[in-house]
Amino acid sequence: RNAGFLTPEGGIPESWRERVAKWPELCGAGEAETPTGACDDEGALRIFEKDADRTFVDATHKQLYINLLMRVWPENRDYNQGLGYTCSLLMLLFDEDTIVRLLTAFTRSDKYTPGYWRAAPDAYVRDAKVYGRLLQEREPDTAALLMVCVPESYASKWFNGLCLHVLPYEALFAYIEQFILEGHVFLFKFALALIARIKPGLLKCEQTQVNLLYEHLRLDPKQYPDDLDGGVFFSQMVEEAKAVKVDPAQIARLREEEAEALAAHRRRVAEQEAAYSDDEIVFSDEED
C-alpha cells in the first residue's frame, strides 16, 4: 500500500530519510555481530526461491532477497514468511549488511520478537493470546464478537508481518519506527489502538460474517481505503497507539502464563500421539 509515499525518482520522502537512517542505531544493530555460517538446508532454499518469485519480478532482486535470507538463516535455522516480508521492505532502504544486522536484532533481542520467525512460532502464538486477554479486559464486547476469529489467526499481520500488508507506507514507517523504539510492547499498544479505531465497523458485523470481520481486522482497502479521512486515518491510528497505556510488567506476566499453557498443551498433544502410536492392532494371523 504505497499510496504515493515512495516514488521511482526520489525514493522515500526527504522528511523520512534522516529518521530512517537512525533505525539501525536505535535498535542496537549499528555494529551488531551478524550470524556466521551458511544455509545448507535444501528445503529452506526452495522456500526462499518460491517467496522470491512471489515478491519480485526481476532476477537481480530475487537473488539479492535469497542471499539475504541465507545470511540470516544461521541465527534461527528456521524460517517464517514474516521474515521475508520484513526483509523485502528493508531492501528498499538499506544496504545488505545493514539489513542483516536489523533482521538479526529483531530476531535476537528480547526487546523485539525472538521466536516469531520460525515455522512453528510459539512465541508469536503466546503473544497473540496475550493480546486476546488484554482485549477481553479492555474491550469485552468486541472480544466477544471476535471469539469466532481467534487472535492467532489474524494478529499475525500486525505482529509477525509488522503490518507490511496492513498499513499504507507513510503510516507503516511510523509504525516500524515506534516498534524499534519501544520493542514488542508497542505491538500490543497498536493492536489495542487498531481495535478501538475500527470498533464501530466491527460491531455492525454479525459473528456469522467471518470474512467481513477479517476484512476489518486486516484493514482491507475495501473497508479502509488509503485516502480515508483525507489520508490521515492510518497515521492517526499509529499516533493513538503511542498513547495507549499498557503495563510492561503485566505483559511479562501474561507472556509467562501463556507460554506455560502452550507448553503444557504441546506436552499433552505429544503424549496423545505417543499413546496412539503405541496402540498395536493384532491381526488374527499374529496371535499365538
Image: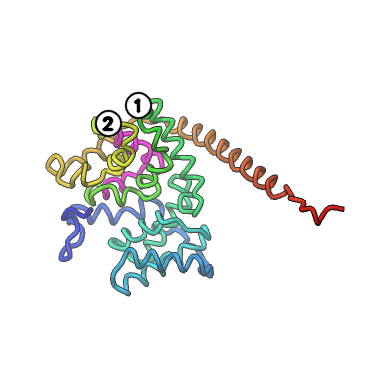
Looking at the image, residue 251 lies above or below residue 228: above
**Looking at the image, which residue sits at the far front?**
284
Q: Residue at x 31, y 40 (%)?
A: 217
The residue tagged with tag 2: helix, strand or loop? helix
| Predominant SS along the magenta part | helix
The answer to whether 9 appears left or right of 23 in the picture is left
Q: What is the magenta range?
A: 172-196
The answer to whether 25 appears left or right of 231 in the picture is right
- Graded by Cα atoms within 10 Å as few (under 14), some (14 to 19) or many (20 or more), the crowding at tag 2 reads some
Q: Which residue is mark 2?
A: 199
Q: In the rendered structure, which disc, 1 or 2, sits on the residue that comes first in sequence? A: 1
The residue tagged with tag 1: helix, strand or loop? loop
- Graded by Cα atoms within 10 Å as few (under 14), some (14 to 19) or many (20 or more), the crowding at tag 1 reads some
Q: Which residue is mark 1?
A: 139
Residue 4 within the magenta-colored segment of the rendering: no
Q: Toward which corner of the image does residue 275 lie, by quadrant?
A: top right
Question: Residue 137 location in percent, x, y?
Answer: 40, 25
Question: Residue 265 location in percent, x, y?
Answer: 58, 39
Who is closer to the viewer here, 263 or 242? 263
**Mark 2 is on which residue type?**
Lys
Figure label count: 2
Q: Are marks 1 and 2 in contact (CB under 8 Å)?
A: yes
Q: Residue at x 32, y 74 (%)?
A: 60
The answer to whether 59 appears left or right of 45 in the picture is left
Q: CA distance from mark 1 to mark 2?
A: 9 Å
